Amino acid sequence: MNSPARPYLIAPSILSADFARLGEEVEKVIESGADVIHFDVMDNHYVPNLTFGSMICKALRDYGVEAPIDVHLMVSPVDSMIEQFLEAGASIITFHPEASHHVDRSLQLIKDGGAECGLVLNPATSLHHLDCVMDKVDQILLMSVNPGFGGQSFIDNTLDKIRQVRQRIITSGRDIRLEVDGGVKASNIRAIAEAGADMFVAGSAIFNQKDYKAAIDEMRAELALANNS
Ligand SMILES: O=C(CO)[C@@H](O)[C@H](O)COP(=O)(O)O
């Protein structure tokens, strides 16, 4: 029931990286086997924390980072930030439906700018936000913590939500990635994959370890055991 249409992707969240050495940190995590760089943009308005904007994304591109950059916008409003991140070299841009007055327009803005688009649903946000956009999104991001901070614990009822979204993806007949973010680590990544996710954001579980490669390898070993039949 849950067979993902594509390989599993591991996306370290740079929220837990050493910001004073960000270029090196990103380089190191990619060399350690990361597939995608997850970029958490917070505005101290939509979420009670403030991180970084498009200049940092552009700085990483200028530094030579070629890996896909997956930008999670925790900002409101979203459209002006979408334009800036398209300009800065984002590969994927996701935003929260309640942060945009015109969700379809914001998704189209991302697509027209040449990036992949998606919606992010918080733990208590209803799946009905997906009803009219399944023909448009390339990715759906389910938050398994309330957004704003790294290092929180995975909210267990997210597993059921993942199963429901995987069903919707199967019904849509489209190749939509299902990403999960918050409290993901080696000890729960297999269950998250078995519920139907195929992209895994991990911040503290990677950047708080001495050996990033060992942390990513351990996650991959768990994913290799996942039963998706
Ligand atoms: O978007 C967010 C938090 O809002 C996440 O990307 C966290 O940064 C994930 O951190 P860990 O829970 O993996 O430490």
Image (cartoon, rainbow, N blue to C red):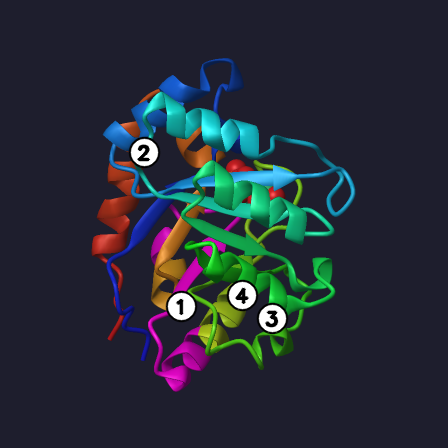
Q: Residue at x 43, y 54 (%)?
A: 115
Residue 21, position as x, y percentages in the image: 45, 14
Say whether disc 4 or disc 2 marks the residue closer to the N-terminus: 4
| Lower sequence index among marks 2 and 1 | 1
What amino acid type should be assigned to the residue bearing mark 4? Gln
Q: What amino acid is at disc 2?
A: Ala
Which residue is identified by label 4?
A: 108
Check residue 195 in the rendering and tell me which mark sits there, or answer none: 1
User: Looking at the picture, how far across and down is residue 144, in whole percent?
Assistant: 56, 55
- Residue type at mark 3? Asp
To which quarter of the image does residue 103 belong? bottom right
Query: What is the magenta range?
Result: 166-190
Of circles 4 and 2, which is in front?
Answer: 4
- Picture layout, residue 88 above or below residue 82: above
Which element is circle 2 on?
helix
Quarter of the displayed picture in which ligand 1 can be seen: top right
- In this rendering, would 145 be left or right of 29? right
Q: Is residue 177 magenta?
A: yes
Q: Nearer the viewer, mark 1 or mark 4?
A: 4
C-alpha distance separating marks 3 and 2: 38 Å
